[in-house]
């Protein structure tokens, strides 16, 4: 479902179950392209890692997918090289300097970041932000706000 709000295009998807969430991940995966960097924004327990698992499976990753809470980054091979970052334990955003930022934020594959707000000044301009709100035990609301050209492109594809 899309909304036009003060000149911005928005996309919202209401998931009532894990199956709905899997279906949304499958649909979204069709439109991701090399170079995309995705930030999943939501409270603890909102389903960021679960959504990432569904998304990566649809991008051809066969490995067991875990949150890289302690390593900061896990890389997987599928349709593309996919970097999965979890910045929850980042104490200071300057810790990003220890990572290969050019490869992670301007990838030849795709990068998915949980808790990206902990490294705001390092994030790329065309970051795709997906907001996840927990609406029930299995229900989630996914929202893309159309704040840049990549988000707008993705919203148009998802229509």
Image (cartoon, rainbow, N blue to C red):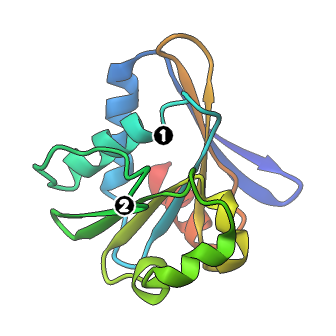
User: Which residue is found at the position 14% from the left and 55% from the top?
Assistant: 60
Disc 1: CA contacts within 10 A as few (<14), some (14-19) or many (>=20): many
Question: Tag 2, which secondary structure?
Answer: loop
Question: Tag 1, which secondary structure?
Answer: helix
Residue 71 sits in which quadrant? bottom left
Can residue 102 be seen here? The reply is: yes
Disc 2: CA contacts within 10 A as few (<14), some (14-19) or many (>=20): few
Q: Please identify the residue farthest to the top as the structure is shown.
A: 137
User: Which residue is found at the position 45% from the left and 80% from the top?
Assistant: 99
Position of 55 with respect to 90 (left or right) is left
- The front one of 152 and 125 is 125
The answer to whether mark 2 and mark 1 are in CB contact below 8 A is no
Q: Please state the horizontal and vertical placement of residue 28, each as a whole percent of the image.
A: 39, 50
Q: Earlier in the sequence, mark 2 or mark 1?
A: 2
Quick one: quadrant of the N terminus? top right
Q: Please state the horizontal and vertical placement of residue 137, each as a whole percent of the image.
A: 51, 10
Residue behind mark 1: 48
Rendered position, 107 above or below 128: below
Rendered position, 41 above or below 156: above
Residue behind mark 2: 31
- The front one of 78 and 31 is 78
Position of 30 with respect to 36 (left or right) is left
Q: Please state the horizontal and vertical placement of residue 68, each as a whole percent of the image.
A: 37, 52
């Amino acid at each position: 479902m899309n909304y036009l709000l003060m000149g911005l295009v928005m996309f919202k998807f209401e998931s009532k179950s894990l199956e709905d969430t899997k279906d949304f991940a499958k649909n979204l995966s069709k439109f991701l392209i090399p170079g995309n960097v995705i930030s999943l924004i939501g409270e603890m327990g909102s389903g960021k890692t679960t959504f990432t698992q569904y998304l990566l499976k649809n991008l051809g990753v066969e490995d067991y997918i875990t949150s890289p809470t302690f390593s900061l980054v896990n890389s997987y091979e599928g349709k593309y090289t996919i970097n999965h970052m979890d910045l929850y334990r980042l104490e200071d955003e300057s810790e990003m300097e220890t990572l290969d930022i050019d490869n992670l934020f301007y990838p030849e594959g795709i990068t998915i970041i949980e808790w990206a707000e902990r490294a705001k000044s390092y994030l790329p301009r065309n970051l795709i932000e997906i907001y996840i709100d927990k609406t029930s035990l299995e229900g989630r609301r996914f929202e893309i706000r159309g704040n840049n050209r990549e988000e707008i492109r993705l919203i148009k594809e998802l229509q």
